[in-house]
Amino acid sequence: MENINVYFNLFLRHCKNNKNLNSKTLKAYKIDLHQYQVFSDAIIDKQHLTQYIEHLNNTFKPKTVKRKIATLKAFTRFLLFEDIIEINPFDKIQLSFKEPKILPKTIPINIINKILKTAYSQLNNNSSEYHHKMSLRDIAVLEFLFATGARVSEVCSLSPYDVDLINHTVKIFGKGSKERIIQIENKDVLDALKNYKSAFKDDIQTSGYFFINKLHKRLSEQSVREIIKKYTKMIDYDKNITPHMFRHSFATLLLEEDVDIRYIQKMLGHSSITTTQIYTHVTSSKQKYILATKHPRNKIKVN
């Protein structure tokens, strides 16, 4: 296809301006499209796409293959809509994916408790105003992750206008800029956020972001990982904890408290209940308790 780079740029501009996709998604699209261009010599037809899909299946994990094909499908739909091609070659390609189910890793509630207790104890032991402020920030980040189940990218992208501590609500913009509202009703979490906001008021206003780093700018995803790593090390916990594990724990622990999965789906911002249902596979401890204490066989006496 002639001028394929022109069409790539038109597609990416469309995704940014019309579909409002974030920079991370746009970057992934750009990489995926370039990889196909190199492989196929910029030819978009059934034969080259089939060969490329076979190459992907032999090279990458199913989840990555699925994403890269989704990029190409979105691109060909765009070409068809813009009358650049007359037939979408994907209409004649059969696709099936068999992704292995990877159970989400969660953090034991006692470990979350230790991490938070350690963070609060550091707040009381700090000797300088700077370290005191950093502790306030760390506590606010940790409390927010567990209180909302938000993705780390969502946490770092929060603007001060998204956090309403008077009405106890947070407006979160998820994938595809889908908006959801999360209520925060725990007093300790609210106090942590209020104390942090008061300490960082000027930086928050200047930067336009709610969570701030030591350089007075937007807190990065990597900085959040470092905060978690810092307190994990302090409690001598030898397993790696990621920000996303707070999200998994949020969902799993709510499910174990018998919260309807539809509510959890909404709070996580999942467009499909299928995505949320993976958490039903990790509640074996709750299932064990139910079967041990609630099963009607317990009422039957044979002796």
Image (tube, grey):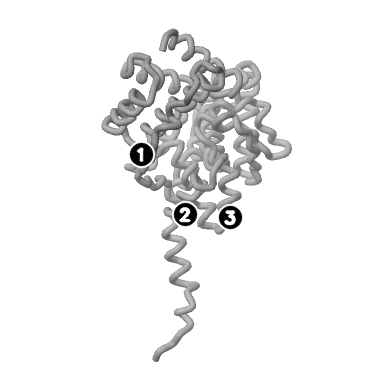
Residue 134 appears at what percent x and percent y? Answer: 52, 27
Residue for badge 2: 280
What secondary structure is found at the residue carrying circle 1?
loop
User: Disc 3 versus disc 1: distance between alpha carbons?
Assistant: 29 Å
Depicted 90 relative to depicted 296: above or below: above
The residue positioned 40% from the left and 45% from the top of the image is: 105
Residue for badge 3: 260
Which amino acid type is marked by label 2? Thr
Front residue (pair 72, 116): 72
Residue for badge 1: 240
Horizontally, is 192 left or right of 228 in the view? right
Disc on the earlier residue, 2 or 3 = 3
The residue positioned 63% from the left and 46% from the top of the image is: 186
Disc on the earlier residue, 3 or 1 = 1
Residue 172 got which mark? none
Q: Can residue 85 be seen by looking at this rendering?
A: yes
Q: Can residue 24 be seen by looking at this rendering?
A: no
Residue at the outermost front position: 86
User: In the rendered structure, are the residues bearing label 1 and label 2 in contact, judged by CB atoms less than 8 Å apart?
Assistant: no
Label 2: few (<14), some (14–19) or many (≥20) C-alpha neighbours in 10 Å: some
- Indicate the quadrant containing the N terminus: top left, top right, bottom left or bottom right: top left
Residue at the outermost right position: 166
